[in-house]
Image (cartoon, rainbow, N blue to C red):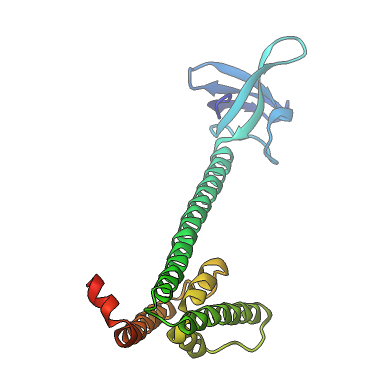
Amino acid sequence: MANKQQGFIKKWQDDKGFGFIQTQNGESVFFHINEFKARRRPEVGEQVVFTVGQDNQGRIQAKEVQELSFVQQKMAQKNQQIRQRNTKRSAQANFEAGQKKRLFLGVGFYGVLILLAATDKLSWLVIAWYAALGVITYAVYAKDKAAAQSGDWRTPESTLHLLSVLGGWVGAMVAQTYLRHKSQKPEFRLTYYLTVVINMAGLLFVLAGDGLAFLDGIL
């Protein structure tokens, strides 16, 4: 629209195939049927947009005459596409930021377990258990997503939650984030968070038995 002018068809001689457009400045500009881009005949009074050019003899005339409504519709569609792209980019940026936060949380959790084991506050077998359950849970999520895409037999949600309760919640979190599986269903997410709380309570129970002095030191 930047290089186009707007006006309306003031006069049209259909038998001769030309007419005149009155611009917003009140000027009258000649145009020929060959420059009218709609697949129909022009109508007197309709709003149009056009560019100003010259014919072979150097006379001023309107070029690329288009219906104003058509151009506005195309511009609206283009703006909508731009907004959709921007929304998608924003969503992708938020998703990537969430990925980093969840990955940091998972790495931090395993780091705390290793620190506890290194200070003899927790058995290395517990760390091995969490690591193994994390890998297994991620693999089960991946298998379930593949089954969902191919229409095969699905893994029950209760099984996924059980794995989280037993210690695979980090693997579940990574799978939900990077595989984008089971990450949009509110009921599932709520239950998942509950499994994390239950597992943390169990871990604290273990620490209360084997590392009570450590807990007393940080509380």
| Residue at (22% x, 72% y) in the render | 219
Considering only vertical position in the picture, is 190 above or below 88?
below
Quarter location, residue 35: top right
User: 165 or 205: nearer the eye?
Assistant: 205
* Count of all numbered marks drawn on residues in the image: 0
Expressed as whole percent of the image width and height from the top left, the position of residue 42 reads 64, 34
Expressed as whole percent of the image width and height from the top left, the position of residue 129 reads 50, 84
User: 71 or 85: nearer the eye?
Assistant: 85
Residue at the limit of the structure toward the right, as seen here: 56
Considering only vertical position in the picture, is 26 above or below 144?
above
Q: Quadrant of the N terminus?
A: top right
Quarter location, residue 213: bottom left
Residue at the limit of the structure toward the top, as seen here: 58
Describe residue 39's horizontal placement relative to residue 125 as left or right: right
| Residue at (52% x, 55% y) in the render | 92
Expressed as whole percent of the image width and height from the top left, the position of residue 122 reads 40, 80
Considering only vertical position in the picture, is 79 above or below 93?
above
User: 140 or 5: nearer the eye?
Assistant: 140
Describe residue 19's horizontal placement relative to residue 199 as left or right: right
Expressed as whole percent of the image width and height from the top left, the position of residue 69 reads 54, 40
User: 62 or 121: nearer the eye?
Assistant: 121
